[in-house]
Image (spheres, helix red, strand yellow):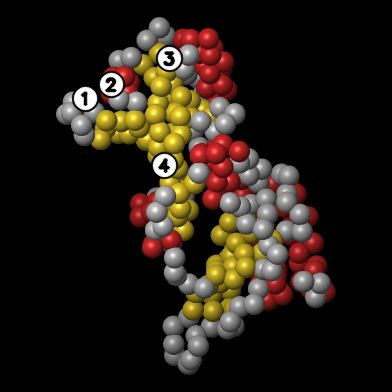
Amino acid sequence: MSDDPHSRGGPPNYVQHGAATPSQAERARTLVAGEVDGTLSTIALEPAGFPFGSIVTYAMDDHGAPLVLMSTLAEHTRNLAADPRSSLLVTAGGDGAGRLAAARATLVGTFTRVDDDAQDAATARYLEVHPRAFWARFPDFAMYRLEVRAIRYVRGFGEMSWVEPDGFAAAEPDPVAPGEAGIVEHMNDDHATSLLTMVEAFLPVEGEVTAATMTSCDRYGFEVQLALAPAEAGGDPGLAFGRIGFEAPLRAAAEARQAMVALVRAAETGAA
């Protein structure tokens, strides 16, 4: 896929030497695995040829392909019967204009009805995620699967890319993701000084860092937004971003506390 100029530029970003970063395939897979609904776009029969958007709920199969329960009465099902080309937009949370800074992934491909001999297994997978969907056994409903051909992933302003379907299928959702919000909130509320200590020890920031705010955490490490002192008296404060890595990938969100403690100790003793 073509390069996007909007994916370059912005404030400086400092990365600790040797710190691992999730691939865009891992980030996209984690996002889609952590949500349960999205916007399905099909090619309309009425009015013919126009994009038609619907809200749908989904589950994922073992390869990350979305499974959607559809009724033959639904307009999008009629559209897909005529032309299976479609996309599913999955977005993270956010309010108002903040949604533009939230992560989202558009999965592009073809939606087709799951084979009869696999309907029960696909329905069971869907009901694991949506146990109250009693209509799954109604005769006009059946499971459909999106054969993903391309993925557009946008993490937020200035970070976007095309993700290869094979990489998406092979990626594992981040095990820290279910507890990420709590980790970020705890570190910012209770350990702001420790964040500054780690930034000063591990990141080669140009300028004086006056504050560090954790913005995300994953199995490999965490990211911070940095406030910088003005370069000259009366000037505007600067902005930068940074990433610090854990000594080893985490296997669960519960391991984050011990990993953070180890990093703070290394920062305080100069073992960077």
Above or below 181: residue 45: above
Question: Residue placed at 56% from the left, 42% from the top?
Answer: 167
Q: Earlier in the sequence, mark 3 or mark 4?
A: 4
Q: Which amino acid does label 3 sit on?
A: Ala
Residue 203 falls in image quadrant = bottom right
Give the farthest residue toward the left. Answer: 47
Residue that numbered label 3 is attached to: 142
Cα separation between marks 4 and 1: 22 Å
**Element on which disc 4 rests:** strand
Residue 111 falls in image quadrant = top left
Percent position of residue 46, x then y = 18, 26
Q: Earlier in the sequence, mark 2 or mark 1?
A: 1
Cα separation between marks 3 and 4: 23 Å
Between marks 4 and 2 in the image, the one whose residue lies nearer the viewer: 2
Q: Is residue 235 left or right of residue 259?
A: left
Q: Residue 45 carries which label?
A: 1
Asked if labels 3 and 2 touch by Cβ distance under 8 angstroms, the answer is no
Number of residues whose C-alpha sits closer than 10 Å to that of mark 1, classed few (under 14), some (14–19) or many (20 or more): some
Percent position of residue 88, x then y = 40, 35
Q: What residue type is labelled 1?
A: Leu
Q: Is residue 44 left or right of residue 98?
A: left
Cα separation between marks 3 and 1: 20 Å
Above or below 152: residue 19: below
Q: What residue type is labelled 4?
A: Thr
Q: Can residue 186 be seen in this view?
A: no
Q: Residue 82 carries which label?
A: 2
